Image: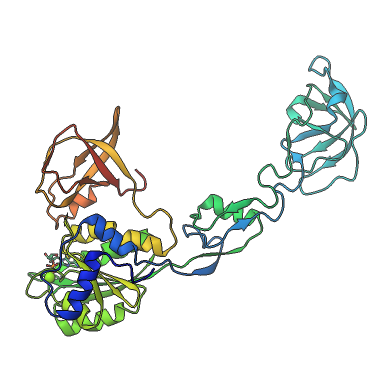
Amino acid sequence: MSREILSPIDQWNKTFFTTHDLCYTPFAMITVDEATDQILLRIIPLGCERVSILESLGRVMGEDIRAPRDIPPLDNAGMDGYAVRHEDIRGASEKAPVRLEVIEDLRAGFLSEKTVGKEQAIRIMTGAPIPGGADAVIPVEETERGNGFVFIQATASAGQHIRRAGEDVKEGDWVISRGDILRPSEVGMLASVGRPYISVHQRPLVAILCTGEELVDVGETLDGAKIVSSNSYTLAAQVKECGAIPVQLGIAKDRKEEIKEKVLQGLRADVFISSAGVSVGDYDFVRDVLRELGVEMIFWRVAMKPGKPVAFWIFGGKPVFSLPGNPVSSMVTFEQFVRPALLKMMGHRRLFRPVVEAFLEEEIQKEPGKRHFVRAMISSGMDGYRVTATGPQGSGILSSMVRANGLIIIPEDREVVRAGEKVGVQLLDRNF
Ligand code: AMP
Ligand code: MG
C-alpha cells in the first residue's frame, strides 16, 4: 500500500498535524464509508503460521491444496452385499432367484486376489474394493445366503452400487484455496488429502485499554459513583468473536501518565484499542497521549450515531482505534470499523456483516447528517423480514443491545422512516 496515494482528507490531516501539532478541532468529520475506506486501505493481512488441522477450525487458509490422489482411491462397494457380474443375474427376482457360487468374503480395507467368474459372486462389505470381474453390487437385502452359494433375487444394471475411484475428488483437483474459512468439512477434507498440518493466516493480538476515573473491574467494590468497566469485556468478547486474540490491559484512570504507561504496552500488540476519553471532556486525555507518543491520527469523529467521537490512528503500520466510552457506542464502532480491520488482517475475503432488507414496524425519527445504527430485533414474517427497535436508544443503554440481533441502518440524509418502509438491517447474530 503506497503512502503516496492519499485521499484529500488524509493529505490535509497529515499537513495539519505536522504544522499545528497541538490543535485538532478543525479535524473534519467524515462519513462511515470514508472512515471504513481510510481504515481498510491501511490494513495489511498478517503472515501465515503452521497449525494442526483441528486447530485450524475457524481460521483462514493460507495456502492452496491439491489432492495428491483420487478419493476414493479405488472403485468400491456402496452397500453391504454381493459383487456380481450383472449379466449373470438377468431376470432374477424373488420368485425366480439366480444361484451364484460365493468364492470369498471381502471386508473393507482389503483387496481381493480373486476374479469373479461366470455364475460366481464375492460377499462384499461397504467400502471394500470391487474385485476383478464384478461390475455390480447386489444389496444383501435382495439375496438369500446358503452354504457356499447365494440366491440373488433382483437384477442389476452395470455399475449399480459401485462408487467410482475419484468420484469425490480426482487426483490434482484443487480442494481448498487460500482465503477459504476452515469449517469442519474443510478440516475433514484436509485429513482426506493427507495433510495433518497446514498454513493459516495469523490472528492479531488486540490490546484493549479502558480509561475512566469512574471504572472498576468486575468483582471489585462498587462504591458511590463507580461503575463496572463493561467495555473491557464487551470489547474482548467482540475481538474473540471475530477470531482474534484479546489482551486485556485493564483500566487506566483519567491521568495522562497512567494512560501513557498502558498505551505503551498496548502499542506492542498488533492492534491497540482504547475505550473512552476520546471526546471533548476536560479529562479526555487519550488523543493527547497518542499524539505525544507519535501515533499518527488518520481521522477523528465520524458522522454516525452512536459512536461519533471514534478516532483511528496508525503507529508503525499498526492500527490503533480510540473508541468512545459509552457501552453501545464502543460496541457499534467496533462492529463498523474494528471488526472489518481484524478480519482483513486474518485473511478473510468477506469483511462485513450481511445486510438484509426488512419492513420497519414502527416509525423512526432522527436528525439528518449522521448515519444511525438502531438496535433492533429482526424476524422473518410471511412476506419477508420485519424489524423493530429494541427500546431506548441512548448510547449507554446496553440492555437494548442485549435484546438486539441486528442494527437498522438509517442513511445520513433521512429524517424520518415510516412504518412499513423497507430498511437495511445489519445482522449481528450468526444464528439468525
Ligand atoms: P467518555 O468517553 O469517557 O466521555 O465516557 C462516556 C460514557 O461512557 C461515560 O458515561 C462513562 O462512564 C462510560 N464509560 C466509559 N468507559 C466505560 C467502560 N469501560 N465501561 C462502561 N462504561 C464506560
Ligand atoms: Mg471519561
Q: Is 39 above or below relative to 407?
A: below
The answer to whether 93 appears left or right of 408 in the picture is right
Residue placed at 30% from the left, 81% from the top?
A: 265
Q: Nearer the viewer, residue 189 or 413?
A: 413
Q: How far across and down, in percent of the image, does residue 48 sit?
A: 50, 68
Res 431 quadrant in image? top left
Q: How far across and down, in percent of the image, does residue 314 sit?
A: 29, 73
Residue placed at 26% from the left, 62% from the top?
A: 234
Q: Is 297 above or below relative to 119?
A: below
The answer to whether 386 appears left or right of 227 in the picture is right
Q: Is 329 above or below relative to 429?
A: below
Q: How is the image coloured?
A: rainbow
The answer to whether 258 appears left or right of 42 in the picture is left
Ligand 2 location (quadrant): bottom left
Q: How far across and down, in percent of the image, does residue 106 sit?
A: 82, 42
Q: How far across and down, in percent of the image, does residue 162 sit?
A: 74, 35
Could one spot residue 90 in this view of the protein? yes
Q: Nearer the viewer, residue 29 or 144?
A: 29
Q: Nearer the viewer, residue 349 or 105?
A: 349
Residue placed at 8% from the left, 71% from the top?
A: 281
- Residue extending furthest toward the top: 95
- Residue extending furthest toward the right: 118
Could one spot residue 238 in this view of the protein? no
Res 46 quadrant in image? bottom left
